[in-house]
């Protein structure tokens, strides 16, 4: 396309993956890209693009490497990721028993002034040799002079020690909040310290317990990690996202602490506050914008909360306020309810914005995938969980359900638009192990999900969930932009779109499947600015 603007950045000698990369006809490789300001102004051959370079333009020789659109992590929890990175790591690679947990908490408390919070992140009960969650009684002897808060890697459970419970005002007389559970000792009724789905409750009771220094260290580390793996946009899916969070993100962007673009979802209970502040879906700009209304649909209390009618009200209210919805649904019953309500509320969906979506869609047998397809919902799911936790699933999940866990292939074939996210800090934000798992249905130990049966070298139960490299890459780029409604501005390499670009050390279409997990960016560009180079 003709363009009279001078380019201030040209990328030459690349294999440029243009939008036709998804077409049956095969891959379309251009050689070079010209960027003016934050926008792609031309794609073509080396000589054509070189001629567009203005005085002082930067020219990058890509040495034949592959240039892809910047990747979109469509579901993660940015502040929790930063907190986990800046704080004490209690994840499965660092801590494998409650005994060990006690030791590192004791050490951490030793370096923390008395009375200040000691926080640990990412513990995994399934990885502990004791095979259970820790309790206040495990934590108390190790940290008698500090309140302690321990967050589970899933983000759905927290353990407080006795001082922590006291500060949060939780005792045997405290009633469970509507959507959370205070686990209690069966004999005495005393809280054990384990709290399920209570992060919102704790934020209300305790305010911010993280240390600012740790948080800023965490943001810096996170920023580096995202750019290093080629993520140029994230969608923050916090169910409690409120105006405060919006302010935090605004400040992070202003200070330049977070280079990637952020779409922050709005907690469904916060829509009134956003509206009063003059903010609705799509408000903000391409660096920080307000996204879908996030609704939680959980079984923490034993029954689905909210029920179908309550869910319908929430969806209708969000639509009425101008927001499409993103419904957290993991279990089959939740996925079915989400699909049913999204389908029946199609007429109230605000026009001109993005569609409604189902987050996770973890358990989804074929008939349910069909229902999701007919509902018009898109799905944002996490194949990275198959890579990182597939071995646990093989050991623990009911065998008949295993083939339909995170069913990327079946959903895609049911006509559902599927986008990928990491659900960080639940898993690592690196998209490449997730793409590897989506293409191969293989865990980090090399096992298949479900495990391969001995007499069947090509097990159809895994193959049905696999997608091609093209599909998987689309799910991390174009479909990510679609899922948040920014497909006109980003998601592929096209003239007029934002210059969010990633140069890769290996071509994903040429490496063997086992090497997909090891692809690494060489250069990451956001809005025409080189924000990271190896
Ligand atoms: Zn999440």
Image (cartoon, grey):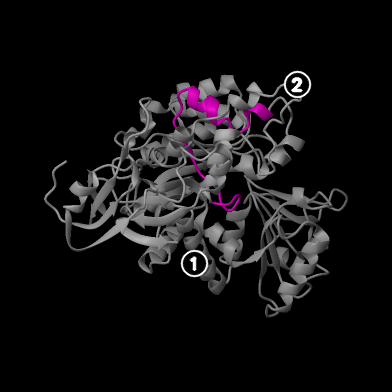
The residue pinned by badge 2 equals 455
Label 2 lies in ligand 1 vicinity (Cβ under 8 Å): no
> Quick check: 398 above or below 209?
above
Front residue (pair 15, 208): 15
Is residue 96 among the parts visible in the rendering?
yes
Query: How many numbered markers are drawn?
Result: 2
**Residue placed at 41% from the left, 58% from the top?**
246
Residue 493 percent across, percent down from the top left: 31, 43
Left or right, 200 with reference to 23:
right
Q: Give the residue furthest to the right.
A: 187
Rendered image quadrant of residue 202: bottom right
Query: Which residue range is magenta in the image?
Result: 402-429
Is residue 296 among the parts visible in the rendering?
no
Q: Give the residue furthest to the left.
A: 4
Taking the magenta stretch, the answer to whether it contains residue 421 is yes
Q: Distance between the residues labelled 1 and 2?
A: 50 Å
Rendered image quadrant of residue 122: bottom right
Crowdedness near tag 1: few (<14), some (14–19) or many (≥20) residues, C-alpha within 10 Å: some
Front residue (pair 207, 69): 69
Taking the magenta stretch, the answer to whether it contains residue 270 is no
- The circle drawn on residue 243 is none
Residues under numbered marks 1 and 2 in contact, where contact means CB atoms less than 8 Å apart = no
Q: Locate the C terminus by quadrant.
A: bottom left
Residue 2 percent across, percent down from the top left: 13, 43
Residue 232 percent across, percent down from the top left: 41, 53
Q: Earlier in the sequence, mark 1 or mark 2?
A: 1
Secondary structure state at the residue bearing disc 2: loop
The residue pinned by badge 1 equals 220
Q: Locate the N terminus by quadrant.
A: top left
Left or right, 439 with reference to 12:
right
């Amino acid at each position: 396309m003709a363009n009279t603007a001078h380019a201030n950045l040209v990328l030459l000698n690349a294999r440029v993956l243009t939008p036709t990369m998804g077409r049956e006809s095969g891959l379309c490789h251009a050689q070079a890209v010209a960027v003016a300001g934050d926008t792609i102004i031309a794609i073509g051959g080396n000589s054509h693009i070189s001629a567009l370079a203005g005085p002082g333009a930067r020219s990058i020789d890509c040495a034949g490497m592959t240039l892809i659109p910047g990747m979109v992590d469509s579901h993660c929890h940015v502040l929790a990721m930063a907190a986990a990175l800046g704080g004490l790591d209690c994840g499965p690679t660092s801590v494998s028993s409650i005994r060990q947990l006690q030791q590192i908490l004791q050490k951490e408390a030793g370096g923390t002034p008395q009375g200040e919070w000691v926080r640990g992140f990412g513990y995994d009960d399934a990885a502990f040799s004791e095979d259970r969650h820790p309790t206040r009684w495990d934590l108390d002897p190790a940290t008698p002079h500090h309140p302690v808060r321990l967050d589970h890697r899933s983000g759905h459970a927290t353990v407080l020690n006795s001082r922590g419970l006291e500060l949060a005002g939780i005792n045997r007389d405290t009633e469970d909040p509507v959507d959370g559970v205070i686990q209690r000792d069966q004999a005495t009724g005393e809280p054990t310290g384990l709290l399920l789905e209570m992060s919102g409750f704790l934020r209300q009771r305790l305010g911010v317990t993280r240390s600012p220094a740790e948080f800023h260290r965490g943001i810096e580390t996170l920023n580096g990690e995202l750019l290093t793996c080629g993520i140029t946009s994230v969608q923050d899916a916090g169910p409690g996202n409120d105006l405060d969070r919006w302010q935090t993100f605004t400040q992070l962007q202003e200070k330049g602490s977070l280079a990637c673009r952020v779409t922050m979802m709005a907690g469904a209970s916060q829509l009134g506050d956003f509206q009063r502040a003059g903010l609705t879906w799509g408000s903000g700009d391409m660096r920080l914008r307000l996204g879908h209304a996030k609704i939680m649909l959980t079984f923490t209390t034993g029954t689905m909360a909210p029920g179908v009618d309550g869910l319908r009200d929430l969806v209708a209210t969000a639509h009425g306020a101008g927001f499409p919805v993103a419904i957290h649904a993991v279990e089959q019953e939740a996925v079915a309810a989400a699909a049913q309500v999204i389908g029946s509320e199609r007429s109230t969906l605000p026009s001109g914005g993005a569609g409604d979506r189902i987050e996770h869609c973890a358990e989804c047998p074929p008939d349910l995938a069909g229902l999701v397809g007919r509902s018009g919902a898109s799905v944002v799911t996490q194949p990275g969980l198959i890579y990182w936790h597939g071995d646990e699933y093989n050991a623990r999940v009911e065998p008949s359900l295993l083939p339909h866990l995170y069913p990327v292939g079946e959903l895609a074939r049911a006509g559902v638009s599927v986008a990928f996210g990491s659900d960080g800090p639940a898993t690592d934000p690196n998209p490449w192990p997730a793409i590897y798992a989506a293409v191969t249905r293989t865990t980090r130990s090399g096992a298949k999900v479900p495990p391969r049966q001995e007499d069947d070298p090509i097990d159809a139960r895994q193959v049905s969930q696999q997608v091609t490299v093209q599909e998987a890459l689309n799910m991390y780029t174009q479909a990510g932009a679609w899922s948040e409604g920014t497909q006109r501005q980003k998601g592929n390499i096209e003239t007029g779109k934002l210059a969010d670009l990633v140069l890769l050390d290996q071509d994903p279409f040429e490496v063997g499947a086992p090497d997909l997990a090891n692809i690494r960016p060489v250069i990451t560009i956001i809005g025409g600015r080189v924000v990271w180079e190896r």
